[in-house]
């Protein structure tokens, strides 16, 4: 087993190509990944507009205005946002403008309403604008036609979708969202909610993995099969027809009942790797079956979840078109040393993040943690292959789970 973690991750991302793109409406594109660079079709705003309710003026003629000696202007009209009629400012006059209204031609500033006073049909300007273009949002201030808004591979947020709408787009190309098949294998696991016989376990792993997929908008199909080669093969065949990627949970090692890899060999998969120098999760594997990625995950909860996070999850993100697959990272300081590493291996630790005035603190959990502590984990830290420990106070890069 000579393959290191970084090499395995590189091979994972190289072995997987994003799914085809599709054009969808703006509401459908939220949380999807842009399949190409997206450019503005129009200027926004499409004309110079007022930022405030107030009065359009010529800046140079208002400089001497004070509350004691206001400048009197005749009120020549008013305009609101979306008004079809255009107006022009004439000498000695002002035009009332509401927020978002087009600024009249000839005006180069807007005096906010609180610095004015009405007087028998006229408007008294009691303070000058601070500068030319004061309270005016210039045409194209938010976006210019032809401007790149979003690059390919970026996830589209709700705010970004609104930005696209303002720029004139109504449909955008996004990568298809992967449908993920998750198959738990083992005579000992049963469906959550079913009667639990002695020496049996509820299939918690597949719930965790499906939950992660759901959180990111991916659809998943789950199944539980016994340790029987023909049953496993039938489940894999069905999933390969209905999904874009397959994840197996359990039966990944070399025991008498670890049948997953043998079944995949029978089905003709192209193995990329199986078992790497990573702990927990060393039994993780990747291959391609019928053009679709297949991730083999061990059955023990810490190994299962860590292998998913470090290998399968980046692979699924790559399949969905993400330009930078993987968990987000931040710099953090170790609240306690971690010294269970093995030189030549990547050793990974679940833990929690504590916010401080300085860098966040990472509190590592015991490496032998089971479900109760894993459920509380908010981050993951690692000892790289060339180290066997990290001292308390070390500043490291940690992966965020929240």
Image (tube, rainbow, N blue to C red):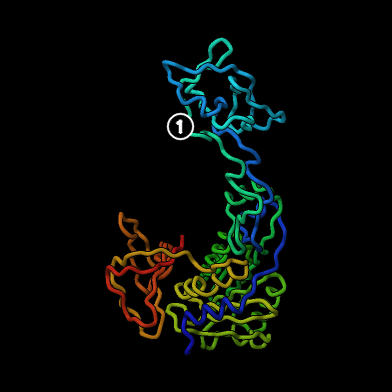
Tell whether 241 sits left or right of 249: right
Total of numbered circles in the picture? 1
**Residue under the point 60% across and 57% down:** 150
Compared to residue 240, the image places residue 357 above or below, namely above
Bin the neighbour count of mark 1 within 10 Å (Cα to Cα): few under 14, some 14-19, many 20 and up. Answer: few
Residue that lies at the very extreme toward the top in this rendered image:
120
Q: Position of residue 221 (x, y in %)?
A: 64, 67
Q: Position of residue 50 (x, y in %)?
A: 57, 33
**Residue under the point 47% across and 89% down:** 2
Tell whether 249 sits left or right of 301: right
Depth check: 171 or 361 in front? 171
Q: Position of residue 121 (x, y in %)?
A: 58, 12
Depth check: 225 or 364 in front? 364
* Res 185 visible: no
* Res 5 visible: yes
Compared to residue 241, the image places residue 122 above or below, namely above
Depth check: 182 or 53 in front? 53
Tell whether 13 sits left or right of 389: right
Depth check: 93 or 235 in front? 93
Residue to which mark 1 is pinned: 130
Tell whether 303 sits left or right of 235: left
Q: Position of residue 109 (x, y in %)?
A: 54, 31
**Residue under the point 34% across and 56% down:** 355
Label 1 SS? loop
Which quadrant would residue 99 be assigned to in this image?
A: top right
């Amino acid at each position: 087993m000579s393959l290191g973690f970084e090499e395995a991750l590189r091979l994972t991302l190289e072995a997987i190509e994003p799914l085809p793109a599709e054009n969808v409406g703006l509401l459908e594109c939220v949380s999807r990944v842009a399949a190409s660079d997206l450019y503005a079709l129009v200027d926004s705003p499409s004309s110079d507009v007022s930022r405030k309710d107030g009065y359009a003026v010529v800046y140079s003629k208002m400089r001497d205005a004070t509350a004691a000696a206001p400048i009197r202007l005749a009120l020549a009209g008013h305009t609101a946002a979306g008004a079809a009629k255009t107006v022009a400012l004439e000498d000695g006059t002002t035009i009332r403008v509401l927020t978002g209204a087009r600024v009249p031609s000839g005006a180069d500033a807007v005096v906010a309403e609180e610095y004015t006073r009405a007087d028998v049909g006229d408007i008294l300007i009691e303070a000058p604008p601070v500068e030319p273009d004061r309270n005016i949002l210039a045409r194209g201030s938010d976006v210019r036609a032809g401007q790149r808004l979003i690059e390919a591979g970026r996830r589209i947020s709700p705010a970004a979708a609104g930005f696209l709408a303002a720029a004139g787009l109504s449909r955008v190309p996004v990568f298809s969202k992967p449908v993920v098949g998750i198959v738990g294998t083992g005579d000992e696991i049963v469906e959550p909610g079913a009667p639990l016989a002695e020496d049996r376990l509820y299939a918690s792993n597949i719930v965790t993995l499906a939950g992660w997929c759901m959180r990111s908008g991916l659809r998943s199909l789950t199944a539980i099969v016994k340790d029987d080669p023909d049953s496993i093969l039938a489940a894999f065949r069905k999933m390969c027809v209905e999904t874009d990627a397959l994840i197996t949970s359990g039966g990944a090692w070399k025991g008498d009942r670890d049948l997953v890899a043998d079944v995949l060999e029978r089905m003709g998969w192209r193995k990329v790797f199986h078992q790497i120098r990573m702990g927990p999760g060393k039994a993780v594997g990747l291959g391609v079956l019928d053009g679709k990625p297949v991730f083999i995950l061990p059955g023990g909860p810490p190994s299962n979840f860590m292998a998913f996070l470090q290998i399968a999850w980046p692979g699924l993100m790559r399949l969905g078109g993400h330009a930078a697959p993987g968990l987000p990272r931040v710099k953090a300081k170790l609240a306690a040393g971690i010294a269970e590493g093995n030189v030549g291996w990547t050793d990974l630790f679940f833990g929690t993040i504590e916010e401080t005035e300085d860098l966040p603190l990472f509190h590592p959990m015991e490496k032998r943690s089971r479900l109760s502590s894993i459920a509380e984990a908010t981050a993951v830290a690692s000892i790289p292959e060339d180290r066997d420990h990290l001292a308390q106070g070390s500043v490291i890069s940690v992966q965020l789970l929240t």
